[in-house]
Structure formats: C-alpha cells, structure tokens
Image (cartoon, rainbow, N blue to C red):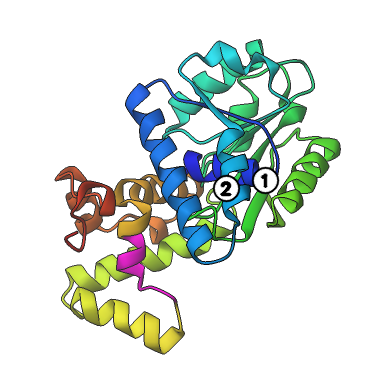
Amino acid sequence: MGSGIAQVFAQAGCNVLLHDTAPAALERARQSIERSTEKLVQKGALTADARVQALGRIVTTGDLADLAAADFVVEAIVEDVGAKTELFRRLDGLVRPGVVLASNTSSISITTLAAATSRPGRVLGMHFMNPVPLMKLVELIRGQATEDDAVQQARTLTEALGKVAVEAQDYPGFIANRILMPMINEAFFALMEGVGTREAIDTVMKLGMNHPMGPLTLADFIGLDVCLAILDVLYEGFGDPKYRACPLLRRLVAAGHLGRKTGRGVYEY
C-alpha cells in the first residue's frame, strides 16, 4: 500500500520521499505507480501532463536518514508490532520535533507505537483502504495521547488528497477491520465446513448483499497473512473467541498460499 499512498500524495501536489530498505521493493513501487497512473490517464481521471508531474514529485531512497527533512511521515511496512515499534523509535530520532508520525496499520495499537517515541501526542493512525488511488476512505485513529492538532493536520491532508476522513478510537481493528475481518473469517469457516464452494460463498455475498467482491476474493486481494495477523490482534486484544481465526485460513498461510501476491490463495492466479 505504500506505493499507493505515495501516488495519491504526489497527485495532490506533495513532494514525496518513498523509502524502503530493499532496492527491488522500490523498483516495484515505481513500476506500480507508473502502471496505476497510466490507467487513470486511460480512464480520463488524470491528464497525461498531471501524470508526468506527479511522477516527477516522487523520489525513492534506501536510506532512512533521508527522511530527516520530512514534514509529515506515513509508515506502511509489514503488519508486525515489533517492526513498526522499532521503525517509530528510529523515526522519532530523525525527524524534527512536532512532525506527525502516522501509521497505515490496519489493527495495531497506535498507543503502543506512540509509546516508542518521545512525541506520543504527534503519533496517530492514518489507515488507507486498498487500492489507495481508488478508495475514498481514510480512518484516522487517535492514540491515548494523540493531540487534537495532529488529528486536524491529518484530516486536512486527507481532504487535500480527495479522501474522506472518519475518526476512530484506538481499539483492536479500529472500525473497518473489526467489522470486516469477522465476516471474512466466517466465510473461511463456511468453506472449511463445506457449507458452499468458494464460488458459491462469494456469489451469495456479491449478488445477495451487493458487495463488489466476495469475502474470499477480498481476502486473497488483501493477503491471507494480513487477514490472519489482524484476526490475531483482535483475538488477543479482546480475548473473545468470536475472533478466533479459522484453521483453514491458518493452514493456507502456513503453506505460503497468501493470495494474489503469491499466485495462490483461496483461488489460483
């Protein structure tokens, strides 16, 4: 999602510094942004000139220290609390005092991430929906110490990106995934128990509930490992068995069948 976030900021006129530790990941991000913006031009949603300008605003770097001059930071690394906490600790020592550190986490406690810094009032969640260039919603999540001014700054930026900001409190899964993931999990239970085929389950939700895609297709799109990680956060955070991840989901992740990104999940790609 980092490439999508970089793209929407660049399209909105912001200069973007896109960081990753792996050069190959930065190259994939650049290619992804080029393809995405080209599709927008073809659809008439972006002019060719605006595309060239947006691409010109994005600079990639493998050196985290280059972010020292950033005015606003959005983190979008792996959904792992240890990795995120360590990154926030390092960012806190790099960027200027007062700069907001935002996380695109889909479920991890903002309060926990903020506690790794000396600026808990300037840390918040800025949870974009996937695919970022097309989806309008951004969840803004307050940690225990998040200041009103930081939230307002994030809200102003969100609106400048052409998105709609909805504020959520710092509870496991926030709003979106607290509601979405149990539905996806129940779809896996229905599949595991033979209630219906994968196609039947997805068709019922598309035609019966008017969802744009079925829950199993959506899980493949999100990444089964990400779905499992979020369910584990919900289960650990609330201690409620209704969030217990389906054994089939856990087995597919153990097999490395993670969805579209690996070519195989519930479906084959």
* The furthest residue to the bottom: 208
For disc 1, the marked residue is: 141
Looking at the rendered structure, the secondary structure element under dot 1 is: strand
Q: In the drawing, does residue 123 fall left or right of residue 60?
A: right
Vertical side of 7 occupied by 18: above or below: above
Residue name at image x 56 percent, y 44 percent = 7
Q: Residues within 10 Å of mark 1 (few under 14, many from 20)?
A: many
The three-letter code of the residue at mark 2 reads Arg
Kindly identify the amino acid type of the residue bearing the numbered disc 1. Answer: Ile
**Residue 212 visible in the shown view:** yes
Q: Which residue is painted at 31% across and 46% down in the image?
A: 225
State the CA–CA distance, disc 2 to disc 1: 31 Å
Is residue 214 a member of the stretch shown in magenta? yes
In the picture, measured across the screen, residue 44 lies left or right of residue 256, that is right
Callout 2: SS: helix
Of marks 2 and 1, the one in the foreground: 2
Q: Residues within 10 Å of mark 2 (few under 14, many from 20)?
A: many
Circle 2/circle 1 CB separation < 8 Å:
no
Instruction: Specify the label residue 110 is tagged with.
Output: none
Residue shown at 57% from the left, 11% from the top: 65
Please give the range of residues in magenta: 212-219
Percent x, y for residue 233? 44, 44
Between 126 and 115, the one nearer to me in the picture:
126
230 part of magenta stretch: no
**Residue that numbered label 2 is attached to:** 51
